[in-house]
Image (cartoon, rainbow, N blue to C red):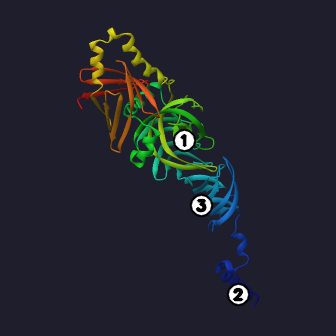
Amino acid sequence: MKKLRYLSIVLLMLMLSACGPAGPAATPAATPATPAGTPSPTGPERADNEQMTLTFAFGERSGTYSGEVANGLPHGTGAFTSQNEGGLDWTYEGGWANGHFEGAGKTVWSDGYVMEGTYTNDRLNGEGRSYQGNRLVHEGNYAGDEYDGKGTFYNLHGDVIYSGTFSNGFLDESAADRKARLEPFKKQCVAMSHEDMMDGGEKLEGAKIRLTGTVLEVYDESEGDEEWYEFRMSAGKGAKEAVSVDYILSKGEERIEEDTRVTVWATFAYIDTFSEGEMKYTEPYLEAWSVEVAPKPTPTKTPAKTPAKTPAKTPAKTPVKTASVNSKLYNSWICRQGQYTAVYTFKKNGTYTGVFYDDMGDVTESGRYTADGRNLRFDAGDYSYGVTYKFSGSKLVLTYPDGSVSTFSVYEP
């Protein structure tokens, strides 16, 4: 009987163990120790709009998190929304490891700027892309959120501003390569006034512009950036006719300081409206390809006096050759370069009109001119500039102060 009772007890225990987790003795054996930071084997925990303060490589940020967590920290995949030190909202969505960005992810700022790619320790490293809205700004290699290594930089209209090597965000090119990259672009740029740009508006988006004026204010593009900055410059009557310029520096190139007179070669991005305190501004926004210190302007009174004095003091020195050269100025000039056509018309009363056509529309410049057989000065009212000129058969060659050259065909109006 004892043997049968013993066998019955053994069989009963075997039957209970076969029933799984219902057996109280099975629970401790089924729960091995879990290493810190490792999600539960039964599936990750989740948070939904949970308030968190996280310490990143770039500083401490408070915000809300939704996604997978382990030990109270984001771990797995999820999205965190916060603000940067300037008060700009941003959201990171993608991979996480113990409270840090890790793996494939994307950061979106409330002003429309986007960075996506592979993150390591909270920063973009390796292959990635940056966008402004849905427009690609940069694609290539990143290191610590900066352009670094091979990459291509675009303007907002898809033109390649630079393709090559970057170094910690800066364009890394030789002086010869920089000159070769910029010269063709400079030749396509057309001088425009603030009024021209405001009147052109959306029709000018993507147009290539040359502008000379004085820097009013200089800003960092975003916190911590040394290579990318923005400034406002006067393009007419002081701060009332200002233009905003966005620019990325080449390695070794120094920033332009306030009160410096500069010449900017750029593409027209859009008409921007923004506020600073109680002040609201509406002005053209340019993406610069090159920003250079401009030579000091020649006083506007000097060229006006020279033509008047020359015939009075030296009537015998007014040769047939000079009269012949100047008479050609009364004709019209036409120049086709790159994507635009420029037409100048000069009248004997000292006035001129310049019309520039491209696929974005047309812009008109008009004012007075003075000429002495070699030097020609344009005065459009709000701004003026001088060039040297010479005729070669039916061609007219203009040389600007920056060394750029435009060649026109001359024809009778």
Q: Nearer the viewer, mark 1 or mark 3?
A: 1
> What amino acid does circle 2 point to?
Ser
- Secondary structure under the numbered disc 1 in the rendered image: helix
Q: In 3D space, how far apart are the residues under numbered discs 2 and 3 (Cα atoms)?
A: 55 Å
Percent coordinates x, y for residue 389 in the rendering: 35, 21
Q: In 3D space, how far apart are the residues under numbered discs 1 and 3 (Cα atoms)?
A: 47 Å
Q: Nearer the viewer, mark 2 or mark 3?
A: 3
The quadrant of the image that shows the C terminus is top left
Q: Is residue 338 left or right of residue 78?
A: left
Q: Is residue 9 left or right of residue 368?
A: right
**Residue at left 69%, top 55%?**
54
Asked if residue 243 shows in the view, the reply is no
In the displayed orientation, state which residue is furthest to the front: 312
Please tell me in which quadrant of the rendered image residue 24 appears: bottom right
Percent coordinates x, y for residue 293 in the rendering: 52, 27
Asked if residue 181 shows in the view, the reply is yes
Label 3 crowd bin: few (<14), some (14–19), many (20+), radius 10 Å: many
